[in-house]
Image (cartoon, grey):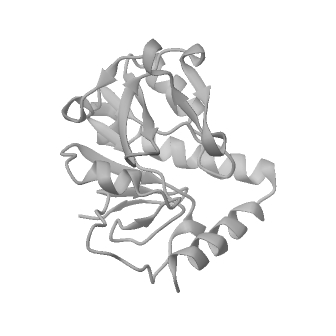
């Protein structure tokens, strides 16, 4: 199955969850995350500001702040297809850009270098148990991960796990995938 069809199928499965059930399942995913050594040991966490039927990251961001962690969010450049991460401390530092994504405002935020991010939570639509993923189609994370040396993991519901995933030469797997049922070590 091609990437576009896989994306459509998994997004449809996610939409089928009634909101209270979706909320319960995503709370379990976050609970599982908070008990990993990767979370406990990370001083600086890179994460996307989730929307729609992604694992909600706002409570994750608040939890990180409560624990004294630094949170950084991606800022994408649609011309170069590159992204960087910027320190995020308050919602006033965000602006809504293309496709309704919330990103840090450059003039209000500090650039965080890749080597200073301990844990990068990589978004995706679907995953296989080897850590490969299909994202949202922009390729920003694939380019960023090419030089990233820190720890990577992805959050998802078990319905986002697929057996057959088309893998390309530039794809880089994450180290762990955390679902509501399990923590999968991929490497």
Query: Where does residue 130 sit, x and y in percent of width and height?
Result: 33, 71
* Residue at position x 46%, y 13% in the image: 108
Q: Is residue 22 left or right of residue 54?
A: right
**Foreground pick, 170 / 35:** 170
Residue pushed farthest bottom? 1
* Residue at position x 29%, y 25% in the image: 112
Rendered-image quadrant of the C terminus: bottom left
Residue 106, relative to residue 108: is it above or below?
below
Where, by quadrant of the figure, is residue 34 drawn? top left
* Residue at position x 55%, y 56% in the image: 180
Q: Is residue 184 left or right of residue 117?
A: right
Query: Where does residue 5 sit, x and y in percent of width and height?
Result: 60, 79
Residue 94, relative to residue 140: is it above or below?
above
* Residue at position x 19%, y 48% in the image: 147
Query: Where does residue 170 sit, x and y in percent of width and height?
Result: 27, 67
Where, by quadrant of the figure, is residue 94 drawn? top right
**Foreground pick, 36 / 80:** 80
Q: How many marks?
A: 0
Residue 142, relative to residue 116: is it above or below?
below
Residue 123, relative to residue 109: is it above or below?
below
Residue pushed farthest front? 79
Q: Is residue 99 left or right of residue 30?
A: right
Query: Where does residue 47 sit, x and y in percent of width and height?
Result: 44, 38
């Amino acid at each position: 199955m091609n990437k576009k069809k896989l994306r459509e199928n998994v997004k449809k499965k996610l939409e089928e969850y009634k909101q209270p059930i979706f909320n319960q399942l995503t709370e379990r995913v976050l609970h599982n995350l908070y008990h990993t050594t990767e979370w406990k040991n990370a001083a600086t966490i890179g994460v996307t500001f989730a929307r729609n039927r992604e694992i909600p990251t706002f409570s994750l961001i608040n939890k990180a702040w409560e624990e004294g962690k630094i949170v950084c969010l991606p800022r994408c450049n649609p011309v170069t297809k590159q992204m960087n991460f910027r320190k995020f401390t308050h919602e006033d530092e965000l602006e809504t850009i293309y496709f309704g994504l919330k990103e840090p405002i450059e003039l209000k935020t500090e650039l965080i270098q890749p080597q200073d991010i301990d844990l990068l939570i990589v978004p995706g639509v679907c995953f296989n148990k080897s850590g490969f993923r299909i994202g949202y189609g922009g390729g920003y994370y694939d380019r960023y991960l090419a030089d990233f040396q820190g720890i990577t993991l992805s959050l998802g519901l078990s319905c986002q796990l697929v057996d057959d995933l088309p893998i390309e030469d530039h794809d880089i797997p994450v180290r762990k995938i955390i679902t509501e049922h399990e923590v999968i070590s991929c490497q």
